[in-house]
Amino acid sequence: MYSDKLEMLFKKSKIEIGDQIKVNNKGKALEGILMPRPELGDNNIVVIKLSNGYNIGIKIEEKSTIEKLAEHTKEEFSFPKIKNIENLKNSNKISLLYTGGTIGSKVDYVTGGVYMLTKPEELLHEVPELKNIANIEVKNLMSIASEDISYLEWQKIADSTADALNAGSTGVVITHGTDTMHYTSAALSFMLKDISGPVVLTGAQRSSDRGSSDAFMNLICSANVAANSNIKQVGICMHATHSDDYCNFIKGTKARKMHTSSRDAFKSINSMVLAKAYQNGKVEVLEKNKDVEKTKKKTIANTKFEPKIALVVSYPDSDPGILQYYNKKGFKGVIIEGTGLGHTPVSTTHKEYNWLSSIKDATSSGMVIGITSQCINGRVNGNVYRNGRLMQEMGAIYCEDMLPEVAYVKLGFLLGNHNKKDTEKLLPVNIAGEITEKTDMNSDE
Amino acid sequence: MYSDKLEMLFKKSKIEIGDQIKVNNKGKALEGILMPRPELGDNNIVVIKLSNGYNIGIKIEEKSTIEKLAEHTKEEFSFPKIKNIENLKNSNKISLLYTGGTIGSKVDYVTGGVYMLTKPEELLHEVPELKNIANIEVKNLMSIASEDISYLEWQKIADSTADALNAGSTGVVITHGTDTMHYTSAALSFMLKDISGPVVLTGAQRSSDRGSSDAFMNLICSANVAANSNIKQVGICMHATHSDDYCNFIKGTKARKMHTSSRDAFKSINSMVLAKAYQNGKVEVLEKNKDVEKTKKKTIANTKFEPKIALVVSYPDSDPGILQYYNKKGFKGVIIEGTGLGHTPVSTTHKEYNWLSSIKDATSSGMVIGITSQCINGRVNGNVYRNGRLMQEMGAIYCEDMLPEVAYVKLGFLLGNHNKKDTEKLLPVNIAGEITEKTDMNSDE
């Protein structure tokens, strides 16, 4: 229930949950559908669903007014219907592994919260066009928000993906929350070997009951990549632009979520996209890589993983003792997001204990320390400045143009399969597309 | 000295330090100037300076060959001369505060390392065009790499900037290393109040002895902003594009280094740039903001700062105990770089201690916990999903569209001046351009 004060305001204007209303607050007017009060939080905050599909909370002040614009219609939301899809006739079988996330969620009009579909087959009911693309076998792996996904889920998804491919699926589509989709795509890239078909992670930035939902097109394009392309890679397939032009299929080890809410949030970093995928079935492979033409093999899942690892940032006055904190907890390795070309504060005079000693102590006692950059774009280089050379001297491993998140996942994968020495050797070497080979050392690219 | 093996190779081809050489290694040829061996590291690695100005180390293998291409010329490097600069006649006085970094560095041909200019006046000798822009007073504040800059340096720079403006300078240019320039620009934005003129941070991605150095143009454009614009803001003025078109003057609280090595590394995030600055003196103010026309006042430096704060990342299997580690060390607050709209793993079943309890424990014992997003672009929102609402319930403060690094600096500034309650109140409120007001809630922008 809303606060008594609000309930009175609603009653006065005969406003009910679900009605279109206008809230005038602090000189601003906002229109939307009145939502039920969320289970938590200030009950003096009015929650409305804007036309762009977003819910927003408005703290009601003394001078605020609320008008009713239109009655609540009881219609259910559903996916918008697509018109220009070609008559695809395809007898390929693909698997759709469901893990949860916004793409499989709807707003619960009782609690006002977003809830997960318990029957992922509903996705097929809502997007009947999927049936024109391929025979789709849906498997319900789990139903969780992606920020709650751990390495245990990565292992489960990797095993199920290998099983699906080895059971004859041409490709696999994995629906997943967007928050950590790029961590999962990196994990699958390392865990899956000799992949026999496309492994396509997809999701939605806006739930399927919104008019502006990206769920529909992302699913269609992902199914197209899985059924109609021959890209034997793990990747993320999501909106390429703000509008519904096409999706990018981005290498699983080069993708990063670069916007909190935009539909084209996923970007390919330090690398070209693998392909553009269109709703009409066309898949334009941009990077001719040898994996595309590889002979079909049995997909192997090696899911060994060492979870006692961490990702830390270095910044002005950052505490180098953090490495010893993790060391005492039995952690096996840490990836540092350094500044610039991969630096930590090493000569700060007012600190009695600095990053250099800390790195040395950590590596001496058996930890692997990898260096990446918080700049995200570009390549680290420990040879340009003195601080970088000193950090290397203390045992830090520079991770080339690997994304910090990918280096974190790779570190866990390597430590799950190798000892410290081999892990340090393999960390800066490309094994799953995570490191782009240096070309002409042109530092502008 | 290089290894005996390498010295023999050099002797055979009469190669000396400084000669132009060609190294054939693993089927690739690289040309450049042979550099002296760095003080540290493998002495079997040949270091050459490429034509793009970068030093690169090449591990010499059995099959590698080294050819001499040209003799070393003993000429000194110097800034390239600019031709099309207009005859500016300006009697304005500006201050140039020198702090170190690549812009004030040269390669030391004895050690092979990059060293800092001990006399920053050399910058004026090397860029005589600066004298046409304004009367420039150079002050040597410090000479350190920016990754080593701490809050103590921020305080010193803030005080000196206020002094310079109050002593009659039209504007101030601060040369600074690029690694943490955006942290310093944020710190100055919060510490300086009623700024009477432009405060322009600048630096270089490539040292001034390189043909492709950006130092020269960045200095010219920054001096132009300081002398010829009326933008009473702290900002960063660096290359806007790969080529020498113009510089962007980016708001100090909205700038972020987004590439490890590219000349246009600094981007304006979630905000328009303040101005475009050209070498010919033109300064195109893009965002007409009220600060531009503000009456000139006495600049006040409030440098109180609480350094016992931290910036941590949340990611799959991230350790929530990190908050208690900092709590035990007496830290007053932590900024979390959450996933997506600002989430931490809260429902991970295999962890006995989760982020929710950790946030609650931290806030209950007096810490301030701020939430930002590792997506960098976009705005956090703790009201869309259940996890975000629960995190708020535990006392976490959502920091709108503030960059994580800026939120970190702001937290230290607020805690240096306010108690917990007021800090929590001010953290999500704009005080120095760090938070962009919501417009139409369109989540695509």
Image (cartoon, coloured by chain):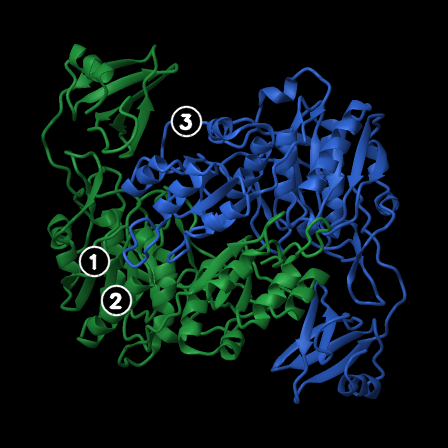
Chain colours: A green, B blue
Image quarter hosting the C terminus of chain B: top left
Does the rendering let one see residue B53? no
Amino acid found under the numbered disc labelled 1: Met
Measuring 24% from the left and 32% from the top, which residue is drawn there?
A38
Q: Are marks 3 and 1 in contact (CB under 8 Å)?
A: no
Question: SS class of the residue under badge 2?
Answer: helix
Which label is found at residue B439?
A: 3
Q: Is residue A145 above or below residue B441?
A: below
Which label is found at residue A71?
A: none
Does the rendering let one see residue A353? yes
Measuring 67% from the left and 76% from the top, which residue is drawn there?
B58
Image quarter hosting the N terminus of chain B: bottom right
Measuring 71% from the left and 17% from the top, which residue is drawn there?
B296
Q: Which residue is at the front of the view, A265 or A356?
A: A356
Label 3, residues with CA under 10 Å away: few <14, some 14-19, many ≥20: few
Q: Which residue is mark 2?
A: A156
Q: Which residue is mark 1?
A: A142
B62 relative position to B253: left or right: right
The quadrant in which residue B57 appears is bottom right
A370 relative position to A239: left or right: right
Amino acid found under the numbered disc labelled 2: Lys
Q: Is residue A173 above or below residue B374?
A: below
Query: Residues at marks 3 and 1, common chain?
Result: no
User: Residue A66's x, y, as percent?
Assistant: 26, 15
Amino acid found under the numbered disc labelled 3: Thr
User: Residue B167's x, y, as percent?
Assistant: 82, 24
Q: Earlier in the sequence, mark 2 or mark 1?
A: 1
Label 2, residues with CA under 10 Å away: few <14, some 14-19, many ≥20: some
Q: How many marks?
A: 3
